[in-house]
Amino acid sequence: MGEYVELSKRVLEYAGGLPLALKVLGSFLIGRSADLWRSVLERLKKDPSNKIMSILQISFEGLQDSEKKIFLDVACFFKWKNRDGVTKILEGCGFSPVIGIEVLIEKSLLTVDGRNILHMHDLLQELGQLIVTRQSPKEPGKRSRIWREEEVCQVLTNNTGSEVVEGIMVDDYFFRGNDVHLSAKAFSLMTNLRLLKISNVQLPEGLEYLSNELRLLDWHRYPLKSLPSNLQLDKTVDFKMCYSRIEELWKGIKPLNMLRVLKLSHSENLIKTPDFTEVPNLEEFDLEGCTKLREIHPSLMLHKKLILLNLKGCTSLTTLPGEIFMESLKTLVLSGCSKLKKFPDIVMRSMGDLTELFLDGTSIAEVPSSTELLTRLELLNLNDCRSLVRLPSSINGLKSLKTLNLSGCFKLENVPETLGQVESLEKLDISVTARRQPPSSIFLMKNLKELSCRGCKGSPSSASWFLRFPINLMRWSSDPVALSLPSSLSSLCSLTKLDISDCNLGEGAIPSSIGDLCSLEELCLSGNNFFTLPASIYRLSNLQHIRLEECKMLQNLPRLPASIHSISLGGCVSLETLSDVLNLNEHQLPDFHLPCVDCLKLAGNYDLALALLKEFIKSSKRHRRGFSIIVPGSEIPEWFEYQNNEGSSITISTPPKTYKNNKLVGYAMCCVFHVPKYSLPFYIRPLPYPVHDLCGRPTDGFGYGILFRKQFGQAVSNHLWLYYLNREELWQYII
């Protein structure tokens, strides 16, 4: 034991305390004999000029051949890539990557983060790339791996590759905007090429040859209509030709047992898919944006291992083959297939694993009743299905459904009462549907977390609908064309977000039982016609955001709970005061935002805005980070030390981080701004309407932003923005 203690001291002395050197060298020496320890230390003494690289080199040389190849592939090509995807490709190369990657992790040559992404220290990556470069210092075409743009161009344009080359990979953006013309024989000598990833190159003479050893073929914007006639893809695992000009992949039946990923997204000349009868292991097929695709080969709909099928935006697709039996399929995307009018019937166990079904933007008129067989379905997206007229009453058979989006289904009149029996449902969006009133059963759903009825207003389509509603649950608004809410909302005990914006809600339409929504965090009430809000809102102890934009009749606000984080009041033209809305001394959250854009009658609340800012600063403790308020106004308070009334910028000096003055709690900023009446707004998800964006951002891009609707500027143009950051928050980003 004493001998190892002395050797350990020598190792520590040699490594100079560098953590990476200690970690890698320790992983290599652990469990080895003292003689080997001495041998390693003697060898390291011979190259004192580059201690760390010598240490790393020894660790590399201790690997098995397959582990060395994996290490070099990651160093040159796969750093920052998903472990599972890399594993599948390297399995196809015969490198046994499952155990190989584990060995590299144990030896501290690789790490994997929580998102399953491969990481490698920059020095280790430099070592791996240096090992490859030493294979042929002056001729990159004689190296096993090529990854630098200029060297890839040199090899492919001058046809200087050789059988030594195993991989050529550059990121998509390298060739973007460049006019790179390749020789037809560029790949003719690279018979052992197994990894190819290039983009944006031209082949004026066509393409004569590609290696039959390819495991990865990723050619972004492939310029030809077809692949080389002699190309064999029987070893290919990952095939990607996005934004290509390809018209047909292959004719007839091809045995492609290794193929797992096939991506042809935005290949706008592709007309049909090939026969997949002998492509048994395909797991992912992406055809998004193939706008001329008209025909899906029936063999695809019978595939047993396909997990993801993406046909988003295939606008020429009118039908799917009549029979579907895809027992492993988990995600089916038909979003934006605007000519697709019918979704096929489901056969028992034909899609038993399906968890996500995207039919948004299609022209389907009804959802088949057989969808009840999709017992594992968690997400059903029918957003913007403008031809959809009915849902099956058997929708309660979807026992696993968590998300249902029916927004924008303008012809949909029946949302079945049986929907309330789907106990797993957590998110429901029935915004802007023909069915103006939601089914009463949804107000009894104890597990529902998000409910959006935005834009649901107008009279029911038939008198019979009234008869189906339990009278004791409803308290009708005096406005006959408004959304009607039940008098009791207490059953929605899990609800965290409620959006009843633009529902024509008048005075008294919001029941006092809204205060019973004990889990509510976000309440959207914009675009309604009430004068006041129920005082019971104060009981919403978890409420953080309340949106009241364009509530033009709103005259005052009740006291809001201490949990509130932001109050959006843009366009509340009748609102006269903000006093007694909340007590900032009780305020629990570190931030507070109060944008009051175009609130005409708040122009006289200039002093109140300053008082709120001062109160926030006064009550500010360590956990208080930021405050933001916008009110009509054009005068910057005199107590702001730095002012500029002519230009649009101010430079201030901030004290160093070691500044000990405890009186400095943060930085208050102020500006007067004006947005022209006809300035162009933009859309930002998840908001359904266009907005303007006003941001305060230090140099690192951090900061608070204020979004307000496009109507801004139509009434009052000058606004005052008061903005505060505590010193720790600001220093974190700019010092």
Image (tube, rainbow, N blue to C red):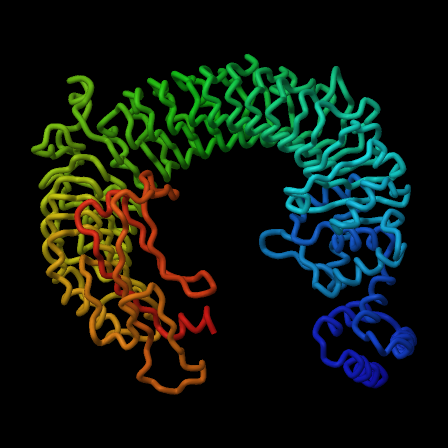
Residue 187, given in percent of the width and then of the height, sits at 84, 36
User: Could one spot residue 449 in this view of the protein?
Assistant: no
**Figure check: 337 above or below 696:** above
Foreground of the two, 142 or 569: 142
Relative image position of residue 221 (x, y in whole percent): 66, 34
Q: How many marks?
A: 0
Q: Is residue 131 visible?
A: yes
Q: Is residue 524 above or below residue 45?
A: above
Q: Position of residue 553 (x, y in %)?
A: 11, 44
Residue 610 lies left or right of residue 156; in this view the side is left
Foreground of the two, 19 or 351? 19
| Residue for point 31% across, 50% down | 707
Is residue 145 shown left or right of residue 644? Answer: right
The image quarter in which residue 584 lies: bottom left
Please name the residue shown 22% across and 49% down the image. Answer: 570
Image quadrant in which the N terminus is located = bottom right
Q: Residue pushed farthest top?
A: 322
Question: Which quarter of the figure has residue 604?
Answer: bottom left
Q: Is residue 603 above or below residue 272?
A: below
In the image, 136 versus 66, the foreground residue is 136
**Residue 78 relative to residue 340: left or right:** right
**Residue at 78% in and 27% down:** 206
Closer to the camera, 280 or 677?
A: 677
> Residue 99 location in percent, x, y?
77, 51
Q: Residue furthest left?
A: 478
What's the residue at 74%, 53% (across, down)?
A: 74
